[in-house]
Image: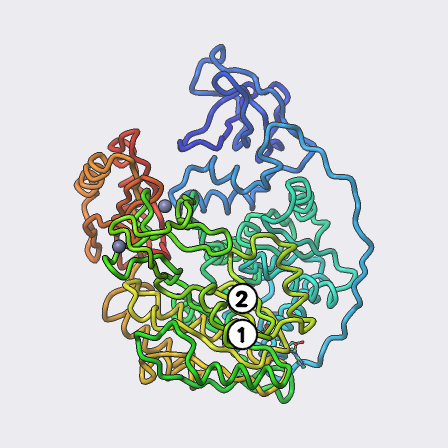
């Protein structure tokens, strides 16, 4: 009798055998329902055979093989297997997580009622390509049918998206599908609309976590059936089955949101390269500020580098950047010159954007008398002041409590806030410009997608004079009325212990500067810093990413950091600090013999040493070769599994981006 080997979403790297009288090889990759322990579980068939290592009478029959939806194809399974091996994550967990939530559940799948709204978009006319754009399009097309990674490096507004659109038209005309990855959900409405306007008549689905379960599953199935020609999606769309995939585009490839920071810690950008190689198709990584790993790959000739040197709209120039020297102690205050510049823009009915680099700068409560600070009782994090709800909140574990009326340590009733969050800056602007229409945007004020769309509308309608915001604001939006951008708190990144912080700062400032005067040529960017002579700022003034990247790479080479080394992190957490410490010590002792060029460091606490009552430790492993690192991790996994007590949770993070 046929036997199916099934993978489930379990923290175990093994398959389970079931009897399946009517199973055939064509069922490989299908979802099934099967008895598991006392209940039922959804799994995926990975093999159909006639024998099992277990006696047949011990095997249970499957409950159902779901044949109403297509199976994972051999190509899909190949990518997912790679993902499991490379990230050292059980295959079953990888497979089930690749499915949209609606198809992971036990209840049978029923497609949502078709309620496609008629396409109301006005088709837009394509501009004539510039010489550089045209050359880029032709260069990518010449790589059709082969694995050809391309780094498309172009300043913001240089016409990268226009190139994607041309390539999509070409591919669709040849009957192929295209996958476009984009970093943020908040980005997709504008981008999606532009795609629809420019690609009328082409079946496009967007895919992101903001969709309802049924809708998301329906779109996934449209891609899997080949009905959808274009998939525009965030990180997880990299796993979306597309039988005729001919091109992958990774827009803003440097963006940190391509890396998943929990569970299966994959990089969608890196998997895009793997998928393209497996399928022998071109892949385009687009960015104004490529990740240094990507830039290095282009320098080393592994990726083809295509550059766009100017803004695409005739007459549009890059904004003028000015550094405003601000003493370190006042880094979070708005400098008088900046206030003046905002007033000037207001008088001309133009918009200003105040960008607050908030990493580590949320306002915390403190006592000037005894220096008490509002720490979270469950984490090493500080609790952040939320004025509107009159609470202190921990952004790491979610703990909330009312703002105390006096210092819990010394009783002082004059508590102050430390560090300047967006709320404090908003308050400062309100008192300086009482008549201004000020809009603050951060993750607290923007949790819902419709709130975001409404916000975009008010900005575009010119119903706002001053925008105050964080990272969220700077990603890819086109706000033509913004002519002034001011950045506060930039220096914070220069003090950081994370070796990637200056790379991130540079990228953010380029993005933020790109918001100024996209349409007109009057954009002005003011950056407050205590170190105007710093090479990072000098490169920024000169719009010189290659110069910045070269200096950073030289430094990384000297210090032996990525891209000149490959890293993995063993992360562990436990409510029992002693058990945690012992596990990490044992783990280091059980490490396989190191090959040359490999290093294993001591366990250290991460920047947040405790989250929600759990102590955390991490241990860095570094190697000069990717394969050496992989061999090491494979050999290490078994002892790790054997050593970990129940009270300790651990995971491996391959190519970590946050140390
Ligand atoms: P990027 O993706 O690099 O930020 P976009 O493709 O969004 O750049 O182009 C920026 C702006 O320039 C858009 O408004 C776009 O419509 C316009 N644009 C792009 N290519 C051209 C072109 N060849 N001629 C005129 N305008 C263009
Ligand atoms: Zn006090
Ligand atoms: Zn907390």
State the residue at coordinates (64%, 58%): 178
Q: Earlier in the sequence, mark 2 or mark 1?
A: 1
| Disc 2 residue crowd, few under 14, some 14–19, many 20+, Cα 10 Å | many
Residue 581's quadrant in the figure?
top left
Residue 226 position in % (x across, y down): 70, 49
Q: Which residue is mark 1?
A: 353
In the foreground, 266 or 150: 266
Residue 412 position in % (x across, y down): 29, 55
Vertical order, 636 against 516 (above or below):
above
Q: With 58 as the anchor, is 325 left or right in this view?
A: left
Residue 260 seen in the figure: yes
Task: Residue 628: give its label.
Answer: none
Residue 478 position in % (x across, y down): 62, 72
Vertical order, 565 against 537 (above or below):
above
Image quarter (top left, top right, bottom left or bottom right) of the N terminus: top right
Q: Are marks 2 and 1 in contact (CB under 8 Å)?
A: yes
Q: Which residue is mark 2?
A: 473
| Disc 1 residue crowd, few under 14, some 14–19, many 20+, Cα 10 Å | many
Residue 498's quadrant in the figure?
bottom left
Residue 300 seen in the figure: no
Count of numbered labels shown in the rendering? 2
State the residue at coordinates (32%, 39%): 613
In the foreground, 7 or 109: 109
Q: Residue pushed farthest bottom?
A: 315
Residue 543 position in % (x across, y down): 45, 83
Q: Is mark 2 within 8 Å of ligand 1?
A: no
């Amino acid at each position: 009798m046929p036997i199916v080997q099934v993978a489930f979403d379990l923290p175990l790297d093994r398959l389970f055998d079931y009897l399946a009288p009517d199973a055939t090889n064509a069922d490989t990759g299908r979802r099934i329902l099967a008895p598991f322990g006392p209940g039922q579980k959804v799994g995926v068939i990975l093999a159909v055979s006639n024998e099992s290592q277990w006696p047949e009478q011990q095997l249970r029959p499957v409950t159902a093989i779901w044949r109403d939806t297509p199976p994972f194809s051999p190509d899909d399974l190949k990518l997912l297997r790679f993902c499991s091996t490379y990230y050292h994550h059980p295959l079953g967990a990888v497979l089930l997580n690749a499915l949209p939530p609606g198809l992971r559940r036990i209840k049978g799948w029923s497609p949502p009622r078709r309620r496609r709204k008629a396409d109301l978009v006005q088709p837009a006319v394509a501009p004539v390509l510039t010489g550089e754009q045209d050359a880029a399009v032709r260069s990518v097309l010449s790589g059709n049918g082969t694995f050809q990674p391309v780094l498309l490096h172009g300043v913001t507004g240089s016409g990268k998206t226009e190139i994607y659109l041309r390539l999509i038209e070409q591919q669709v005309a040849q009957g192929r599908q295209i996958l476009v990855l984009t970093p943020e959900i908040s980005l997709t409405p504008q981008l999606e609309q532009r795609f629809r306007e420019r690609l009328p008549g082409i079946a496009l689905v967007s895919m992101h976590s903001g969709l309802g379960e049924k809708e998301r599953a329906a779109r996934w199935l449209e891609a899997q059936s080949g009905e959808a020609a274009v998939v525009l999606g965030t990180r997880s769309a990299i796993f979306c089955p597309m039988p005729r995939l001919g091109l992958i585009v990774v827009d803003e490839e440097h963006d940190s949101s391509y890396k998943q920071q929990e569970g299966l810690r994959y990089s969608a950008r890196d998997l895009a390269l793997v998928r393209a190689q497996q399928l022998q198709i071109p892949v385009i990584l687009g960015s104004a500020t490529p990740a240094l790993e990507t830039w290095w790959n282009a320098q080393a000739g592994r990726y083809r580098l295509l550059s766009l040197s100017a803004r695409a709209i005739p007459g549009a120039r890059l904004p003028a950047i000015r550094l405003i020297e601000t003493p370190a102690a006042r880094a979070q205050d708005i400098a008088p010159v900046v206030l003046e510049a905002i007033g000037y823009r207001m008088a001309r009915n133009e918009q200003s954007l105040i960008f607050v680099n908030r990493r580590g700068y949320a306002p915390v409560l403190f006592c000037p008398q005894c220096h008490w600070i509002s720490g979270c009782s469950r984490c090493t994090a500080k609790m952040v002041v939320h004025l509107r709800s009159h609470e202190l909140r921990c952004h790491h574990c979610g703990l909330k409590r009312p703002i105390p009326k006096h210092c819990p340590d010394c009783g002082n009733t004059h508590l102050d806030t430390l560090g300047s969050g967006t709320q404090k800056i908003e308050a400062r602007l309100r008192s300086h410009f009482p008549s201004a229409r000020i809009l603050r945007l951060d993750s607290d004020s923007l949790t819902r997608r419709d709130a975001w769309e409404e916000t975009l509308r008010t900005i575009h309608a010119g119903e706002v004079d001053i925008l105050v915001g964080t990272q969220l604001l700077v990603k890819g939006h086109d706000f033509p009325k913004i002519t002034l951008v001011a950045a506060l708190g930039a220096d914070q990144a220069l003090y950081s212990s994370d070796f990637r912080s200056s790379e991130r700062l540079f990228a953010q400032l380029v993005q933020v500067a790109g918001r100024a005067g996209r349409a007109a040529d009057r954009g002005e960017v003011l950056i407050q810093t205590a170190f105007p002579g710093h090479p990072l700022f000098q490169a920024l003034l000169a719009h010189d990413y290659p110069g910045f990247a070269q200096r950073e790479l030289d430094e990384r080479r000297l210090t032996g950091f990525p891209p000149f080394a490959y890293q993995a992190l063993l992360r562990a957490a436990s409510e029992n600090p002693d058990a945690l410490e012992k596990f990490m010590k044992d783990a280091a002792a059980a490490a396989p013999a190191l090959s040359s060029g490999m290093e294993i460091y001591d366990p250290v606490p991460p920047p947040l040493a405790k989250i929600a009552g759990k102590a955390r430790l991490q241990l860095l492993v570094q190697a000069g070769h990717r394969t050496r690192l992989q061999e090491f991790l494979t050999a290490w996994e078994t002892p790790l599994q054997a050593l970990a007590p129940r009270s300790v949770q651990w995971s491996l993070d391959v190519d970590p981006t946050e140390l």
